[in-house]
Image (cartoon, helix red, strand yellow):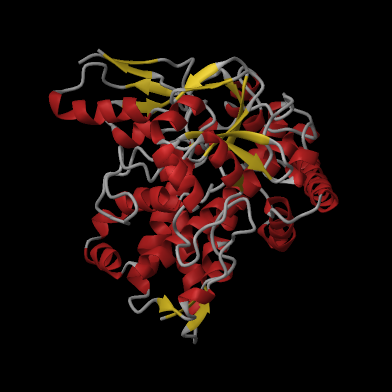
Amino acid sequence: MTTAESLDALTVPAARASGCPFDPAPSVERARQTDPVIRATLWDGSSCWLVTRHQDVREVLGDPRFSADATRPGFPFLTQGLRELVGRNPTFIRMDDPDHARLRRMLTADFMVKKVEAMRPEVQRMADDLLDRMTDGRTSADLVSEFALPLPSLVICLLLGVPYEDHAFFQDRSRVLLSLRSTGDEVRTSMDELLEYLTRLAESKQGAPDDGIVSRLVARGELDFTEIAAMGRLLLIAGHETTANMTALSVLALLRNPDQLARLRDDSSLVKGAVEELLRYLTIIHNGVPRIATEDVTVGGRTIRAGEGVLCTVNTANRDEDVFPGGDSLDVGRDARRHVAFGFGVHQCLGQPLARVELQIAVETLLRRLPGLRLDIPFEDVPFRHDMGIYGVHALPVAW
Amino acid sequence: MRVHADQEKCCGAGSCVLSAPDVFDQREEDGIVIVLDAQPPAELHEAVREAAAICPAAAISVS
């Protein structure tokens, strides 16, 4: 394949093959094998580089010459909404060091391993309560709305100090912000409503402090309410949408791989490794992690010029045969720890210890308590989230 | 084996603690890496090398 041909062929977001909803788009997978650092065309006609191999993705995301600052001209945007929001209440995931590090370090203690491990009993209790309710007198339910979504929502609400009874409000706004189909106006409105809600919440903590992150950021006195609201928005959305979709998609992938499901049921000591493998295999950040070059940098034999945008397709990196032999198969016994499902570099997911605990508990509890768990609709009818910035399923009807 | 962790580079992702909990921990106040055992016994060397390999900030070095 020549570069000119691939330029015409590759558009982002790229379509998956029908019948292969767990696999990256064939056009991007083909690029990884034949032309791994390649030009692609975005929805708005602009072009950027796709970096598709594991080693190259690690190099780009680990290199400070690639900036995460979305206000730099030429930064690649996956949707109109994202482009229109640039510069409005940015959070540290779209900043570079030292600003990024200064803000991130206000939160690292809250998500560190021992802190999150100490939450296991509480998360387990929440998972059990949700399953008690879901199975009470029934033999079928939508796993997304009754388990996969409420579990991480409850956890992040507890951590932040956000009242869970407001979940319909923030889940709806999150959905608009993550939809590839939302217009600029819809995104702006949802963003404003969410920020207004979180600003009011931050103000309310002044007179009535609690143990939550929002309250402690207020007490710390280094950020104003708008900045705290922006940070709260990031944590609230990242904290529930990602884990919710990984949970539901993991269950579906296991149901589609009954041999792997059986291994996991027979030996629960495999759960931790299986969660890493599911993160690798499913990689719900499916449209790439955006960066922009600030200098000319050679990656995989190609020169990326200063000012050119890059999308690191972590989902194809996680299928790279050089690192994960037989990577197109789900293998719960695989050592998948080198996956880049949480990204790489200093911006790598802050909440990954929490996501791991939630996923381990969700998968283990579901398999243990629902031995007859099965899909309740034909696989072809499962509504996959092709239209969302975070992949997964909109609903997952199951029976037991 | 000598293990070194650069606290300036560290981004607190915690993957080293998951890989080698006897060698790495995180500071209570900000989640930044601390080395518990700078000269770990041989049976931990593989886990330490894995921790260095997956550290997103390239903050861990082994000599």
The residue located at (66%, 31%) in the rendering is A94
Give the side of residue A381 with respect to residue A231, left or right: left
Asked which quadrant contains residue A72, the reply is top right
Above or below residue A71? Residue A181 is: below
Give the side of residue A224 with respect to residue A394, left or right: right
From the top left corner, tell me how far across and down residue A393 is, in percent: 55, 64
Which quadrant does the C terminus of chain A fall into?
A: bottom left
Residue A390 visible in the picture: yes
From the top left corner, tell me how far across and down residue A73 is, in percent: 74, 25
Above or below residue A69? Residue A6 is: below
Relative depth, front residue between A327 and A40 = A40
The residue located at (68%, 52%) in the rendering is A178
The residue located at (48%, 41%) in the rendering is A314
Relative depth, front residue between B41 and A207 = B41
For the image, the number of numbered tags is 0
From the top left corner, tell me how far across and down residue A121 is, in percent: 42, 54
Give the side of residue A357 with respect to residue A199, left or right: left
Residue A317 visible in the picture: no
Relative depth, front residue between A28 and A220 = A28
From the top left corner, tell me how far across and down residue A324 is, in percent: 30, 43
Relative depth, front residue between A187 and A31 = A31
Above or below residue A187? Residue A95 is: above
